[in-house]
Amino acid sequence: MKPTAIGATGLRKKFSDHVVLDGVDLRVPEGTVFSLLGPNGAGKTTAVRILSTLISADGGTATVAGHDVATNPDGVRAAIGVTGQFSAVDKLLTGEENLRLMGELYRLPKDEITRRATTLLTRFDLGDAARTLTATYSGGMTRRLDLAMTLVGEPRVIFLDEPTIGLDPRSRRGMWEIVEELVAGGVTVFLTTQYLEEADRLSDRIAVLDHGRIVAEGTPAELKQRIPGGHVRLRFPDVHELESALRVLGNATPDVDALAMAVPNDGSRRALKELLDRLDDASIEVAALSVHTPDLDDVFFALTGHTSEQKAPLS
């Protein structure tokens, strides 16, 4: 089992009489992407703000990179980077100047600031715009620079709070690739997002937060398997094989024109084996098979009663 990068037990927070977090437990292993999903107002950003020491919890405990957020906030801050919903880029400075400013805030030696700024500008494909005022940057360039600024301090844990909101599909995919590279290098990423395709692609584990509580947690595949509606689509070489399969399986929905049928199935290895064994025992030939499971939109709606608040633009 990988060491824990982020852990929380019984986190509680309320503002006036409104309970935002109501006993939240989390465990995020090192070198993984953990996504926290939930409707607007569910408490996602509050959780990030507590874990990144921006605000204190009313109850419970939490550690980040081995440091207690309440008793050793400086230790936490030295180990993390945070990229919020709104860019921290100074529009009156160039890209290079923004990175150098971050280096100065970290009190790095000048030669080290130069090295890291040059490396990050190249890594994030911003070298040609290094000495251009960031007020002229596109949305994608600004978000890449914002994340680059987060990396100046070489954090072990990064909190990304809605990092791709408002970006076009190409820029969003570019950010995904950067996140995947960071994790491959051992960085832990705590992600909040309402783009469910983003969570599905990036996450090792996902937790769904609703009304201040974690209502489900698991891998994307595990969460999808919890929701009814999964099925296996079978296609047959001729109508005779289709009719034979219907007699054997019984609970299938046929598509005669396509020589196909849909069979309720959770898509697990065991369930697929049982299905194919029944067909093999009856000497029924299958031309093609595909597994269809509910997507994260279905999961999100089933668990929270909401559709996802943000939809990624069509690519």
Image: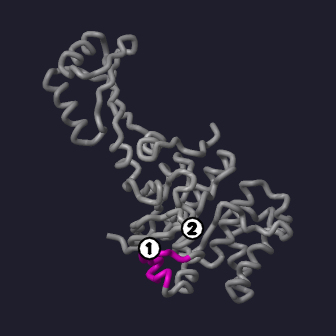
Q: In the rendering, which numbered label is found on residue 5?
A: 1
Which residue is found at the position 42% from the left and 43% from the top? Answer: 299
Which quadrant of the rendered structure holds the C terminus? Answer: top right
**Is residue 185 visible from the viewing direction of this image?**
no
Please say whether residue 234 is one of the residues in the magenta stretch: no
Camera-side residue of 91 and 17: 17
Q: Can you tell which quarter of the image residue 84 is in?
A: bottom right
Whether residues under marks 2 and 1 lie with C-beta atoms below 8 angstroms apart, the answer is: no
How is the rendered protein coloured?
A: one colour
**Three-letter code, disc 1:** Ala
Camera-side residue of 172 and 109: 172
Q: Start and end of the magenta stretch?
A: 56-70
Q: Residue 278, how many percent across, how many down? A: 17, 27
Q: Residues within 10 Å of mark 1 (few under 14, many from 20)?
A: many
Task: State whether residue 273 is above or below residue 252.
Answer: below
Which quadrant of the rendered structure holds the N terminus? Answer: bottom left
Q: Can you tell which quarter of the image residue 309 is in?
A: top right
Where disc 2 sits, the SS reads: loop
**Residue mark closest to the camera, 2 vs 1:** 2
Q: Earlier in the sequence, mark 2 or mark 1?
A: 1
Q: Residue furthest left?
A: 281
Which residue is found at the position 22% from the left and 30% from the top? Answer: 276
Q: Is residue 90 left or right of residue 277?
A: right
3D distance between C-alphas at marks 2 and 1: 31 Å
Q: Can you identify the residue that label 2 sits on?
A: 16
